[in-house]
Amino acid sequence: MAEYKKPFGVKIDLETGVIPGAKKLVRKLSDLKGYFADENAYSELLKDDPVVYEVYAIEQEEKDGDLNFATTVLYPGKVGKEFFFTKGHYHAKADRAEVYYALKGKGGMLLQTPEGRAEWIPMEPGTVVYVPPYWAHRTVNTGNEPFIFLALYPADAGHDYGSIKEKGFSKLVIEEGGEVRVIDNPRWKSD
């Protein structure tokens, strides 16, 4: 006879993005060394070492067929012209997909194939983004308030942050003339 897990429900605070009882991860600017293009602006802002984002995760065992979910609160800010973003990652099991649902604020998702083909999808409350297998993904806050979203992903997907740390994304999301622009990343390393 199969052993059944007990179903459960949690309530997400839609104003703050907090999931009570969830595992909390805090990423400060110092955790993103080498990720932003403008190193001088990074060094200057690092003196204050602001919190860039927080993650509230409900995780299951890392096994096939199960799902994790998490909210992220990505704070507004910029390093030079570049908007605050999450580290971004591929999945350790690259054939795993993910779904994001914007709850509050304004931002977007930058996605990229291993070869560097990039897509930018703007997000506002109610926007759902499907991240196909094999695509790296990073969220970006392009607004003036916290950008809060929910992510649903296979429990066994894992995170490959190393590839992004090493190569970066092929595009940058910046503010120029009061507009959001997606430009080529001059530091991106293609194979």
Image (tube, rainbow, N blue to C red):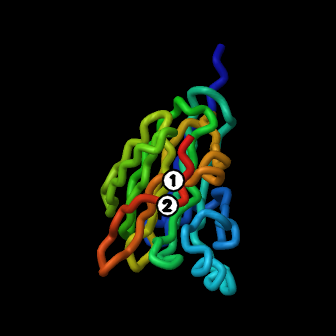
- Residue 8 seen in render: no
Judged from the image, the secondary structure of the residue bearing numbered disc 1 is loop
Give the quadrant of the C terminus. top right
What residue is pinned by disc 2?
A: 186
Q: Quote the CA–CA distance across marks 2 and 1.
A: 10 Å
Q: Is residue 130 left or right of residue 59?
A: left
Identify the residue at horizontal 64%, vertical 18% (top origin).
2
Q: Toward the viewer: 5 or 153?
A: 153
Q: Position of residue 35 (x, y in %)?
A: 60, 63
Circle 2 or circle 1, nearest the eye = 2
- Residue 11 seen in render: yes
Q: How many marks?
A: 2
At label 2, counting other C-alpha atoms closer than 10 Å, the crowd grade (few under 14, some 14-19, many 20 or more) is few
What residue is pinned by disc 1?
A: 169
Identify the residue at horizontal 52%, vertical 48% (top origin).
9
Q: Position of residue 17 (x, y in %)?
A: 50, 66
Q: Position of residue 103 (x, y in %)?
A: 39, 62
For residue 15, what is the image quadrant? Answer: bottom left
Q: Toward the viewer: 121 or 10?
A: 121
Q: Is residue 105 left or right of residue 87?
A: left
The kind of residue tagged 1 is Phe
